[in-house]
Image (spheres, grey):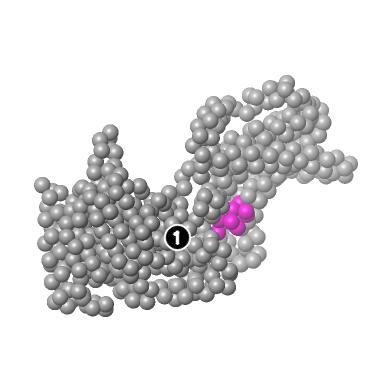
Amino acid sequence: MTIHVRGLSRAFVAAGRETPALLGIDLEVAEREFVCLLGPSGCGKSTLLNIVAGFLRPSAGDVLVDGRPVTGPGADRGVVFQEYVLFPWLTVAGNVEFGLSLKGTPAAQRRATVARYLDLVGLAAHADKYPVQLSGGMKQRVAIARALANSPAIILMDEPFGALDAQTREVLQDELSRIQRVEHKTVLFVTHSIREAVYLADRVVVMTSAPGRIKQVFTIKLPEVRDRFAPEFTHYESEITRLVKEEVAKVHE
Amino acid sequence: MLLSGVADLMEWGVRGASRTHRVALAWRVGALAAFVALWSLAGGIVEATRPFNPLFLPAPWIVVGALVDLARKGQLWIHVVATLERVVVGFGAAAVVAIALGLLAGQVRGVRNIVEPVVELLRPIPPLAVLPLFIVWVGIGEASKVGFITYATFFPMFVTTVHGVAQIDGRLLRAAQSLGARRRHLFFRVILPAALPDVLTGLRLGVALSFFVIVISEFVGAENGLGYLINDGRNFFLVPQMLGAALLLGLLGYAGNALVRLLERRVLRWQHPR
């Protein structure tokens, strides 16, 4: 599935004044492409993701998924949130099979799918635990498994590793990269970490500070399995850093 | 709180208790025993030295004796059942109405805007103040007693249910929607389980309150019930009967609370899994 964002703008009304958050965004995400939205905080990248997810309406323009306009949230676009947002009353397995049980998938098939995805994220031993018993990293693995188990063509991730410590974060980046090599989803991934974007993305979309526009798009021509210390990697990193710094500086002017 | 004692004991039977648990339980049981011992001592001294008529402070065995006596005459059971019946019917009706209306009002703004102001207006009125009205409207029969419990216990259960629904994390709804949940799914799979802790808190308040208000309504024109026994004891100066009935009410209220707690432990295990 493809995502096609056309002339999209969004304004928020705060204290009686209309403040634009996104202005004239045009973006195409191809089938099986991994695109990172990168920008300083408050640049509207999460707003863009929420509009694609169908949680928010655009003020102008629209989003097409496989040519059809988005009118609300749907099972074709799985979402992974920054704060995990697991159902606390369901076990790990219960969370992962949530979407399948809504669809009425037979129990045996559900069990097999749950087992497969818990295995994929390395949580097979924790199927019967409740979310309160898990660490942040484990919760986010469950959230990823839950999104994948529902087999959406598109996965939207809103700073999914933002609340994790640096080590866990890199481990999960490795896992996500490995999972993507197996699952080949169309991914829109919001982050403010340049390193993370360069490590994961096929293309990095750098956004301007508020109101958010697309400043520049980088195609990352690196092998599928990436080395964070390769010279080409750091080259991309420093180039994008320079660009982002300009935007951060604008905020402080 | 001793209220959790019954559930603790049941668990103990199944799993064995931890050391800290055992020590705490020993203290609780000890405190209870000390209280009964002190009461017995006071009753015994009054009985022996008669500084005033021992009728005023009957010892525990006399209170229990009065209850046994009533039981032998086959009367005790009638009173206990009468009270329990009123509580179960009155509280049950209130629970159904309060939870249904609370779930609806918690979700639908329009309903909430209509129901909540009325509830907020009536809620601060002590329920006892409207008991005479109930009697004027529906007489002093069963209907007014049951209706009164329903009225009094409706409020805490309604308010906690509305709160339970209103405080749901919107992100949970979003997560469910992007997993394919429709309106009906959202209600049964997200809103209901998310509101359940608050609903159960409401039930616990409701149970406690129903034993609180039943007594007063049984003071007024009842022919049976534990409240009647107390009032009857006052008329005929049967202090052991008054104390005995009060004790039974306490035990029933305790058992009611323990039941809801047990239910909470079962259905809210996800909050404190082992």
Q: Seen from this angle, which residue lies furthest front? A: A67
Q: Residue at x 11, y 62 (%)?
A: A242
Q: Nearer the viewer, residue B208 or A81?
A: A81
Q: How many marks?
A: 1
What x and y, as percent, mark residue B119? 56, 30
Q: Is residue A182 left or right of residue B89?
A: left
Query: Can residue B111 be seen by looking at this rendering?
Result: yes
Q: Seen from this angle, which residue lies furthest right? A: B73
Circle 1 — which element?
Answer: loop
Report the span colored magenta: B261-271
Q: Nearer the viewer, residue B39 or A144?
A: A144
Q: Residue at x 40, y 60 (%)?
A: A77
In this rendering, the answer to whether A45 lies above or below A227 is above
Whether residue B262 appears in magenta in the rendering, the answer is yes
What x and y, as percent, mark residue B59? 74, 41
Query: Can residue B18 be seen by looking at this rendering?
Result: no
Q: Amino acid at mark 1?
A: Ala
Q: Residue at x 37, y 65 (%)?
A: A1
In this rendering, the answer to whether B150 lies above or below A132 is above
The quadrant where residue A119 appears: bottom left
Q: Is residue A48 left or right of residue A84?
A: left
Q: Residue at x 28, y 33 (%)?
A: A16
Q: Is residue A64 left or right of residue A93?
A: left
Q: Nearer the viewer, residue A77 or B246?
A: A77
What x and y, as percent, mark residue B69? 85, 42
Q: Main secondary structure of the magenta part?
A: helix
Residue that carries the numbered disc 1 in the rendered image: A75
What x and y, as percent, mark residue B77? 82, 43
In this rendering, the answer to whether B131 lies above or below A115 is above
Chain letter, disc 1 residue: A
In this rendering, the answer to whether B136 lies above or below A11 is above
Whether residue A107 appears in magenta in the rendering, the answer is no
